[in-house]
Image (cartoon, rainbow, N blue to C red):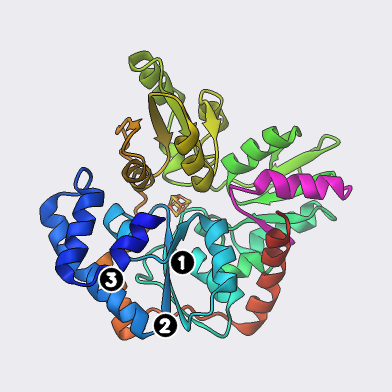
């Protein structure tokens, strides 16, 4: 991302502000940019001193996203990068399960998250006990856990996946002869992935095993509290007003919403769709900051700015807290060594599937 590198390498606070204005003045109020530029400049100085690398998820607010990360992307891209970095400190500007994944891949490194309040409704929507119960209900079925889970749940799983490679992981397991796959914890992603893979979706129940067709994805009941808010009517209303709009949704939206969209994809795939689309205008059904960040990168295309769904967990990560994180070397991600060892296997298996 050339714009990000350019701001990061600014030689002074004033130059940092000038470059942030050039990139973000249409998106972030100037009074806010003036404060944020100060934090960004300090962070970029300190980061080099400490040999730290900053990973920024696509859902970070625009001033942070464009000014301090060394790498930006979705969970899968950032997992791959964190597995290869030679920095001493990794600061994960994202939510806790992402920082945990970086720690699992780099147990010897210091991994920091700027705020311990950055959770996720999907990660808290499944427990180790739930996974064990499902394994008992469906003996022999491999467990695929979305990367949006905590380390102890990953440690109970056979494979991890992200929204970008979920169908690939499922197809890989089907090709190995598995007929039933437990896919946790996002009900909508599991359902949408089943559709993409061409097999039925069955929702699990705590009351006991459900009857299964010959092949099936067995899903759980957790949902992303942001993406579940989009409705089919939202899509219909936009199309009535803007018949030529291209609508791209994240696969954590419901199957009913997805069926009305033009394309679906992970945050990385959304970035690529927007770059390639010839449509005059587009709409993203995902977290609002993601839309802002894509709009800043594609000023020649019109993004409909109708978003009102900001993730309260991602919003916990600010430039101010990122600076404090570097200065105080806080908050360290610590995980038991046996959990790290067990959780590494499903992540490595995922990373091997290209
Ligand atoms: S956007 Fe949804 S899936 Fe992502 S961190 Fe927020 S609650 Fe979790």
Q: Residue at x 64, y 37 (%)?
A: 191
Residue 291: numbered disc:
none
| Quarter location, residue 348 | bottom right
At 34% from the left edge and 43% from the top edge, which residue is drawn?
A: 288
Disc 2 versus disc 3: nearer the observer: 2
Q: Are marks 1 and 2 in contact (CB under 8 Å)?
A: no
Q: Earlier in the sequence, mark 3 or mark 1?
A: 1
Is residue 160 shown in magenta?
yes
Which x, y percent locates residue 208? Answer: 74, 47
**x%, y% of residue 252?**
53, 42
Q: Position of residue 120 (x, y in %)?
A: 45, 57
Q: Nearer the viewer, mark 1 or mark 2?
A: 2
- What x and y, as percent, mark residue 207? 69, 47
* Residue 132 visible in the displayed image: no
Q: Which residue is mark 3?
A: 321
**Residue span colored magenta:** 157-178
Measure how far apart labels 2 and 3 are at the Cα level.
18 Å
Marks 1/2: CA–CA distance: 22 Å
Residue 97 in the image: above or below residue 246: below
Q: Residue furthest left?
A: 31
**Res. 51 mark:** 2
Pointers 3 and 1 in contact (C-beta within 8 Å): no
Q: Residues within 10 Å of mark 3 (few under 14, many from 20)?
A: some
In space, the residues marked 3 and 1 are separated at their CA atoms by 14 Å
Circle on res. 96: 1
Can the viewer see residue 124 in this picture? yes
In front of the other: 140 or 59? 59
Q: Is residue 284 positioned above or below 132 on the image?
A: above
**Quadrant in which the N terminus appears:** bottom left
Q: Which residue is more in the foreground, 284 or 21? A: 21
Residue at 59% in and 72% down: 84
């Amino acid at each position: 991302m050339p714009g990000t590198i350019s701001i990061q390498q600014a030689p002074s606070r004033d130059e940092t502000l000038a470059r942030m204005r050039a990139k973000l003045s249409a998106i972030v109020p100037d009074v806010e940019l003036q404060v944020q530029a100060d934090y960004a400049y300090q962070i970029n100085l300190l980061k080099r001193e400490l040999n730290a690398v900053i990973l920024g998820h696509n859902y970070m607010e625009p001033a942070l996203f464009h000014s301090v990360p060394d790498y930006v992307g979705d969970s899968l891209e950032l997992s791959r990068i964190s597995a290869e970095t030679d920095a001493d400190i990794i600061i994960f500007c994202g939510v806790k399960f992402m920082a945990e994944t970086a720690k699992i891949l780099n147990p010897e490194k210091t991994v920091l998250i700027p705020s311990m309040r950055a959770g996720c409704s999907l990660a808290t929507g499944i427990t180790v006990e739930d996974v064990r119960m499902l394994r008992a209900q469906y003996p022999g079925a491999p467990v695929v856990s979305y990367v949006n889970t905590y380390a102890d749940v990953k440690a109970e799983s056979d494979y991890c996946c992200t929204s970008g490679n979920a169908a690939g992981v499922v197809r890989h397991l089907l090709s190995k002869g598995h007929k039933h796959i437990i896919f946790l914890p996002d009900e909508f992603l599991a359902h949408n992935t089943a559709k993409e893979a061409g097999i039925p979706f069955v929702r699990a129940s705590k009351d006991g095993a459900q009857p299964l067709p010959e092949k099936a994805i067995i899903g759980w009941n957790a949902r992303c509290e942001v993406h579940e808010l989009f409705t089919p009517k939202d899509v219909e209303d936009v199309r009535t007003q803007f018949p030529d709009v291209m609508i791209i949704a994240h696969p954590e939206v419901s199957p009913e919403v997805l069926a009305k969209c033009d394309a679906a994809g992970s945050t990385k795939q959304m970035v690529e769709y927007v770059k390639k689309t010839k449509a005059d205008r587009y709409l993203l059904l995902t977290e609002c900051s993601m839309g802002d960040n894509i709009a800043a990168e594609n000023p020649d295309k019109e993004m409909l700015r109708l978003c009102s769904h900001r993730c309260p967990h991602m919003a916990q990560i600010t430039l101010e807290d990122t600076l404090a994180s570097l200065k105080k070397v806080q908050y360290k991600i610590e995980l038991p060594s046996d959990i790290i060892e067990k959780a590494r296997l499903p992540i490595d298996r995922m990373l091997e599937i290209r």
